[in-house]
């Protein structure tokens, strides 16, 4: 009994999980997602995360340190979630690119990402829907 009470106290006092930046795919098709952000010294982009329909995944772990992040997503057919801020993206399954300019000269594609305003929250979830 004492062990059960001690475990309950530890769980109650544990700090909340740090969710970071996550994306939830509310659409009917699987999507691939890329994120753009300032890493403290330079702009960078990372991807591709494959997110099945009705599933969520974490893109940036830990506490968020910036107000604005950028995202691009596509279902490879009819759905694209894009915006007005260009970042480089890789053509393979995974990429991590430092810098935003001269994408084609470095062998990357360029995509227009949409802005996410986290309002300085420590964690944020972006939903993608049809």
Image (spheres, grey):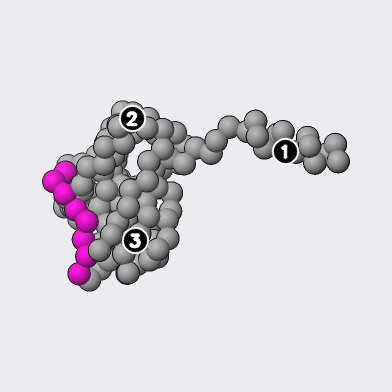
Callout 3 secondary element: loop
Taking the spot 49% from the left edge, 37% from the top edge, the residue there is 18
Q: Are marks 3 and 1 in contact (CB under 8 Å)?
A: no
What distance separates the C-alpha of mark 3 from that of mark 1?
34 Å
Taking the spot 37% from the left edge, 41% from the top edge, the residue there is 124
User: In the image shown, does 34 or 120 lie closer to the viewer?
Assistant: 120
Q: Counting other residues with Cα less than 10 Å from the Cα at mark 1, is it few (<14), some (14-19), or many (20 or more)? A: few
Residue under pointer 3 = 26
Left or right of 12 on screen, residue 105: left
What distance separates the C-alpha of mark 2 from that of mark 3?
24 Å
Q: Which residues are drawn in magenta?
A: 78-86
Q: Position of residue 87 (x, y in %)?
A: 21, 46
Callout 1 secondary element: helix
Residue under pointer 2 = 120
N-term-proximal mark, 3 vs 1: 1
Residue 24 occupies quadrant = bottom left
Residue 73 occupies quadrant = bottom left
What distance separates the C-alpha of mark 1 from that of mark 2?
32 Å
Left or right of 74 on screen, residue 55: right
Q: Is residue 92 above or below residue 77?
A: above
Instruction: Assess whether residue 119 is covered by the magenta stretch.
Output: no
Q: Position of residue 11 (x, y in %)?
A: 67, 37
Callout 2 secondary element: loop
N-term-proximal mark, 2 vs 3: 3
Instruction: Assess whether residue 80 is covered by the magenta stretch.
Output: yes
Furthest-right residue in view?
1
Q: In the rendered view of the protein, which quadrant contains the C terminus?
A: bottom left
Which label sits on residue 62?
Answer: none
Residue under pointer 1 = 8
Depth check, mark 1 against mark 2: the one in front is 1
């Amino acid at each position: 009994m004492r062990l059960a009470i001690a475990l309950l106290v530890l769980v109650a006092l544990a700090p909340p999980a740090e969710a970071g930046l996550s994306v939830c795919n509310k659409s009917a098709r699987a999507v691939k997602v890329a994120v753009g952000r300032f890493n403290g010294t330079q702009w960078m982009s990372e991807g591709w995360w494959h997110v099945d329909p009705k599933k969520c995944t974490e893109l940036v772990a830990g506490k968020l340190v910036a107000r604005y992040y950028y995202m691009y997503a596509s279902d490879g057919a009819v759905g694209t979630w894009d915006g007005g801020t260009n970042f480089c993206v890789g053509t393979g399954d995974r990429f991590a690119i430092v810098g935003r300019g001269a994408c084609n000269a470095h062998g990357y594609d360029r995509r227009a990402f949409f802005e996410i305003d986290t309002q300085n929250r420590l964690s944020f979830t972006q939903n993608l829907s049809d």
